[in-house]
Amino acid sequence: MSDEAKQVVWILGAGFSRSLGGPLFGTLFGPWSMATLKAHFPPAEFPRLFGDASDVVHWVYNYGRQFSLGRALAWDRERGETGEELWQDAEQYLQILDAAASDPRSPWATRINRIVHTHLNRVQGPERAQPSLVEINGAARRLLAAECSEFTKVLDLQSEPVTQYATWARRLGPEHTIITFNYDRLLELLGAKTGKLACVPPGWERDGLAASVYKLHGSVDWISEDAGKPERVIKVSSDPFAALTCDSPAKIVIANPGPTKSALTDTLEGQWSAAFKAILLADAVVFVGYRFPPTDARAQQTLLHALRNNKKHYLAVHIILGPNTASLDCIRLRQLLALTLADRRELQFGEKLHFKSRNLRAWALGAADFLGQAEIEHITEPFKFADFP
């Protein structure tokens, strides 16, 4: 098989940037987060990121985790509060909060309002106005964008940890397509450093000389000036942290879990369509740090449908979710992909290429190691390697 013009699709999730300091959902909104954010984004420069609503976002999240992650210094006076078990992680919390803000008559809206009311009466007194659920949800979206961006604000592109990412980027070409669910600007920074990949925001044309990047869940520097209108126009701001500084959270173009994700996904239909077409024509698909989270039902349906209908005789599919290939996330993703590709037979070394064949492999590596070391034949022709797990 020739490597010439092989179409490779990279599907990136939060694990892609983890070794550079990118967060996972399990680390968001912890009791340490506010102090860290203030160090990266000083309140004098980013006043819209902080305030009563932002403090409530953090406190309510940790309350709903029974303060299992520890207690924030700002709320130490509430040592006697034990909290409740309301959500398992920040992903579920964001989904519930977004739904509550969308429907103020819902049970969750009533529940969260009561929690906030009781708490604020204890620590601030009844004279202080309580932020609305819309304000709290808007603050949560800003904080999410900030926590996903803080590592890029201080990232040294000349540093050793970036080396493997730059090596990967330099191997890319116009035959490669990158599909990302991350909001941060790491790919834009790598593109500026190497000239080998280019983001394609809504309404833009692909470069043609570089790998195309499609951000299916938006970006921290995308802004919609006509939020709430049927036809939204999305613009790339000159401010790399526009989601933190814009005058209204409604303008932020990041598809966080909840009803907001559904609405923005419709707006970003062009991104999804381009991703679907790329997978249909791919010779290889590589999942790097992406596991189809439970709140990403549309992504699971759309991308797996494209994989199932892939046009190539042979398809190589790779999973990179860290060194533990026996983790629940890795097993789940592998089983989803096995079901999707059930009509293709596994191709063994030495066999002739048959119609509807494939290889499905999980690498016991983190993203940085795989990106820095994997050559094109590892990706497009894994059947050649007998010791491949």
Image (spheres, helix red, strand yellow):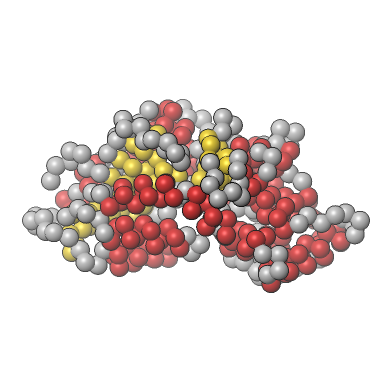
The spot of residue 223 in percent (x, y) is: 57, 40
**Above/below status of 23 relative to 71:** above
Name of the residue lying farthest toward the bottom: 107
Q: Is residue 365 visible?
A: no
The spot of residue 86 in percent (x, y) is: 65, 69
- Quarter of the image for residue 30 reads bottom right
Left or right relative to 102: residue 285: left
Residue shown at 12%/46% (left/top)?
1
The spot of residue 378 in percent (x, y) is: 24, 46
Image quadrant where one finds the C terminus: bottom left
Left or right relative to 217: residue 133: right
Name of the residue lying farthest toward the front: 230
**Residue sitting nearer the eye, 326 or 90:** 90
Residue shown at 31%/57% (left/top)?
306
Residue shown at 51%/30% (left/top)?
156
**Residue sitting nearer the eye, 53 or 149:** 53
- Quarter of the image for residue 79 reads bottom right
Left or right relative to 34: residue 206: left
The spot of residue 132 in percent (x, y) is: 76, 57
Q: Is residue 103 visible?
A: yes
Q: Disc count in the image?
A: 0
Left or right relative to 62: residue 235: left
Residue shown at 47%/32% (left/top)?
189
